[in-house]
Image: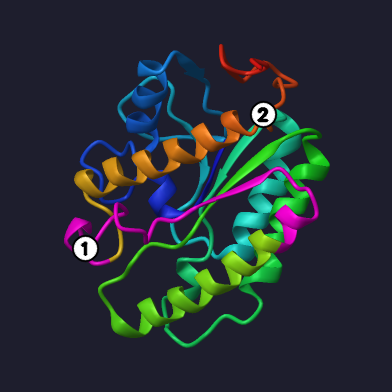
Amino acid sequence: MPIGASVTFGVGSTTGNSYRKNLQDLMNANNMTIDYVGTRNHGNFNNNAVEATSGFVISQIAAAAHAAVPIFLPNLVLIDAGTNNCNSGGTVPDAGANITNIINDVFAQSPGSTVILATILVNSDAKQDACRVDENRQIATLTGSMQAAGKKLVLVDMRGPDGPLVSDLADGRHPNDAGYVKMANVFFRGIEEVVSKHILSPPLNTIFTSKTVGDS
């Protein structure tokens, strides 16, 4: 289940696919099968379900996820939350705590699930970008705490050397097609990490399968 706002939905993409179709292609090429789930559909490919709404801030993403997760019972959840909280710059001191609540709610409502959490993309506006950098510090802190507590959580860095650059943004905020390809590659490495650590449980509703799951 891809959870987020406009980036996850696919704004800036010429197809509306976001990173999701590219990620599916990477998984298929590596003998993995994915079935996206969510209450919405967007993109020009068949497997285009998503749980994302443009403009949503963390609290709205949390409410949407709270309603959708028990319906679909995903075993793998991809979360990108917090971008719109920074649209006015400043800081969002409770971002980490609120994203932690989303993750814990996913774990509670879909037992055995695993979460891949993304850091927040670059932004061409200096004030918004500074806010996102601060949110990413909070995301790194919450990830360390939750992993130390044994939670099935993997962090992927969208601001790493191979993540989207400002030049990969369609409008200064949302990735263009090349930027979404980069996002897919980063998310795929997160999936590889999940599989290598053997922290992906079989889906409760048979919504995500891979021949590598359960391999020793």
- Of marks 2 and 1, which one's residue comes earlier in the chain? 1
Position of 36 relative to 144 (above/below):
above
**Total label count?**
2
Query: As shown in the figure, which amino acid type bears the numbered disc 2?
Result: His
Q: Looking at the image, which residue sits at the far front?
A: 216
Residue beneath the point at 28% across and 55% down: 164
Position of 118 relative to 37 (above/below):
below
Q: Quadrant of residue 112?
A: top right
Q: Nearer the viewer, mark 2 or mark 1?
A: 2
Report which residue position mark 1 lands on. Answer: 171
Report which residue position mark 2 lands on. Answer: 198
Residue beneath the point at 62% across and 20% down: 207
Judging depth in this view, the residue of 29 and 92 nearest the camera is: 29
Tell whether position 153 is magenta. yes
User: Taking 210 as reference, is 27 left or right?
Assistant: left
User: Under tag 2, what secondary structure?
Assistant: loop
Q: Give the range drawn in magenta.
A: 145-172
Q: Do the residues labelled 2 and 1 touch (CB within 8 Å)?
A: no
User: Taking 27 as reference, is 66 left or right?
Assistant: right
